[in-house]
Amino acid sequence: MSYNNEQLNKLSLTGLESTLRFAQIALDSTERLVKLQLEASKQSLEDHTKAARQLTEFKDSQEAINHLNKLATQSIDKLVNHSRDLYEVVSGTQSELSKLVEESVGLFNKSLISSIESVAKNAPAGSDATLNAVKTSVAAAAAAVNTFSKAAQQVAEFTDSSVKAATSATADAVKNSSKRGATV
C-alpha cells in the first residue's frame, strides 16, 4: 500500500487539525475549571469574612451555635453545587474528546478502506480472497470501535444520572438535617 504526496499531505493535515482541536478543547476546559475555582475561592473568602464579623456580634452562645449550624449547612450546599459544576465541566470535556476520537477513527477507517480499494484495483489475479479478508477485518474493527464507543457513552450517561441523583440526595439530606437541628 503506497501513498502519493497528496494523500500524505491530506493525512498530515487531518492529524494536525485533530491535534489542534484536542488542544483547543483542553484549553477551554482548563479555562472553565480555573474560572470556576477562582469564583469559588473568592466566594469562600467573602463568606468567611462575613461569618467572622457576624460571630463577633452574637452575645448569646446558643444563638452563635445556631448560626454556625446554619453556616455549615450553607457551606455543604455550596460544596455540593460546586462539585456538580466541576462534574459538568469534566463530563462535557469527556464528551467532546470522545466525539473527536470517534471522528478521527471514522476518517482513518475511510482512508484505510479507500487505500485497500485502490490496491485492489491494481492487485494481481487471485488476491481477491486476501483483500476481502482485510476489508472484513477493517469492518469488524470499525464495528468493535463503534460498539465500544456506544458502551462508553451509556456508562457516561449512567454515571451522569447517578452523580445527579447523589448530589440531589446529599442536598436533601443536608436540608433535612438543618431543619431537624433548627427545631431542637
Image: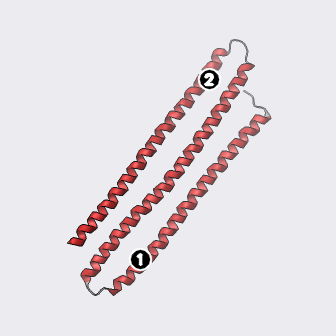
Q: Quadrant of residue 181?
A: bottom left
Above or below, comparing residue 93 to residue 140 in the picture: below
Above or below, comparing residue 177 to residue 159 in the picture: below
- Residue 156, given in percent of the width and then of the height, sits at 45, 45
Residue drawn at 31 percent across, 60 percent down? 172
Determine which residue is flagged by label 1: 48
* Element under disc 2: helix
Pick the residue in front: 85 or 2: 85
Residue drawn at 26 percent across, 68 percent down? 179
Q: Earlier in the sequence, mark 2 or mark 1?
A: 1
* Element under disc 1: helix
Determine which residue is flagged by label 2: 135
Give the side of residue 137 with respect to residue 112, left or right.
Answer: left
Residue drawn at 26 percent across, 65 percent down? 177
Query: Label 1 sits on what residue type?
Result: His
Query: Label 2 sits on what residue type?
Result: Lys
Pick the residue in front: 146 or 19: 146
As drawn, the label of residue 111 is: none
- Residue 123, given in percent of the width and then of the height, sits at 73, 18
Toward the left, the furthest residue is: 184
Q: Quadrant of residue 134?
A: top right
Toward the top, the furthest residue is: 126
Q: Residues within 10 Å of mark 1 (few under 14, many from 20)?
A: few
Toward the right, the furthest residue is: 5
- For the N terminus, which image quadrant? top right
Q: How many marks?
A: 2
Above or below, comparing residue 124 to residue 1 in the picture: above
Above or below, comparing residue 133 to residue 40 in the picture: above
- Residue 52, given in percent of the width and then of the height, sits at 38, 81
- Residue 35, given in percent of the width and then of the height, sits at 54, 65
